[in-house]
Image (tube, rainbow, N blue to C red):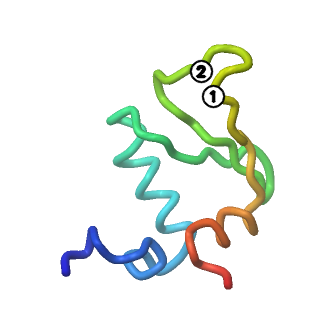
Amino acid sequence: MTDENLPINQRFHSLDEYLAWLQQYGAPADHAWYKEIGPGVYELQTGNFHPLDGEGQQQRTFTREELEKKFGFKK
């Protein structure tokens, strides 16, 4: 099994490490990443993808706790 097949919480030591990796490698490649917009509040950044109003609406802001749970850093 390669590292890419492991869950995110086993490839990275912390949420901060994972978010830094996403910003460094995901942003330049137009992949989604999360920008901290306030203390413990993050906004999903989606590169050039802009869904039309009313179509494909998804959650754009997340608390730190939501991201920790989403990526398996918090049980």
Q: Name the residue rendered at 73%, 64% in the picture.
A: 66
Q: Secondary structure at mark 1?
A: loop
> Is 40 in front, or is 30?
30
Q: Name the residue rendered at 58%, 47% in the picture.
A: 34
Please tell me how crowded label 2 is: few (under 14), some (14-19), or many (20+) other residues with Cα within 10 Å. Answer: few
Q: Is residue 69 above or below residue 10?
A: above
Q: Quadrant of the N terminus?
A: bottom left
Task: Report the residue that reaches farthest toward the front.
Answer: 55
> Is 6 in front, or is 27?
6
Query: Looking at the image, do the residues carrying marks 1 and 2 touch, with CB atoms under 8 Å apart?
Result: yes
Q: Secondary structure at mark 2?
A: loop
Amino acid carrying label 2: it is: Pro
Q: Is residue 75 above or below residue 64?
A: below
Task: Report the residue that reaches farthest toward the top.
Answer: 52
Please tell me how crowded label 1 is: few (under 14), some (14-19), or many (20+) other residues with Cα within 10 Å. Answer: few
Residue 33 at x, y percent in the picture: 51, 45
Q: Is residue 37 left or right of residue 34?
A: right
Label 1 – label 2 distance at C-alpha: 6 Å
Residue 57 at x, y percent in the picture: 69, 30
Looking at marks 1 and 2 on the same chain, the residue that comes earlier in the sequence is marked by 2
**Residue indicated by mark 1:** 56
Mark 1 or 2, closer to the camera: 1
Q: Is residue 69 left or right of residue 34?
A: right
Amino acid carrying label 1: it is: Gly
Residue 18 at x, y percent in the picture: 47, 64
How many marks the image carries: the answer is: 2
Q: Name the residue rendered at 41%, 39% in the picture.
A: 31
Q: Name the residue rendered at 66%, 63% in the picture.
A: 67
**Residue indicated by mark 2:** 51
Residue 70 at x, y percent in the picture: 62, 66
